[in-house]
Amino acid sequence: MMNYKKTLFWALILPLVFSAQANADGNELLQKCNKAVQFMDNPPKNPDFGSIGFCLGMMQGITNLNSVYEVRLSDEALFCGPEDGINNGQATRIVVKYLKDNPQALHQHEGVLAIAAFMDAYPCD
């Protein structure tokens, strides 16, 4: 029988893999999230709100869904964030750092990489 952690992982990933953006990889996510970090640090005159919104929305979706898993299936969450949560800016910086530190993985799907970044930053005991 498959454990809850694996089931939750695939429940998060499969919809992303079969979505309209199934070919979206880490290179695209890094580009979009770099624009979000740039906007947070020093807003450009003509920000790319599409990329910024996509990145921040993805961060919000992943962290919110994992929070539900932490509450409902406490020891089966994919990652265990701080009690006061992770804001979208912090989440974006975590993902950007992970992507920059792991260029060999940028060919992988953006959802897989974002979750891997959070699992790396906030492992469960």
Image (tube, rainbow, N blue to C red):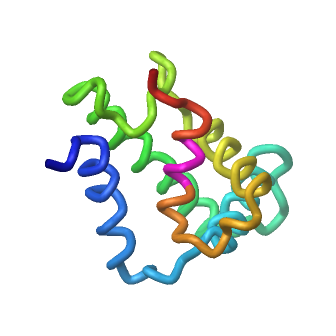
Q: Give residue 57's position: percent from left, percent from top.
A: 48, 55
Tell me: residue 25, above or below residue 95.
Answer: below
Q: Residue at x 20, y 49 (%)?
A: 2
- Say left or right for 122 vs 9: right
Q: Give the residue furthest to the top.
A: 83
The image quarter containing residue 19 is bottom left
The image quarter containing residue 75 is top left
Q: Give residue 109's position: percent from left, percent from top.
A: 52, 70
Q: Residue at x 48, y 56 (%)?
A: 58
Magenta-highlighted residues:
114-118
Query: Looking at the magenta stretch, what is its main secondary structure?
Result: helix
Q: Residue at x 59, y 46 (%)?
A: 117
Specify whether residue 16 is painted magenta: no
- Say left or right for 101 vs 83: right
Tell me: residue 85, above or below residue 68.
Answer: above
The count of marks equals 0
Quarter the C terminus occupies: top left
Q: Give the residue furthest to the front.
A: 1
Specify whether residue 115 is painted magenta: yes
Q: Give the residue furthest to the left.
A: 1
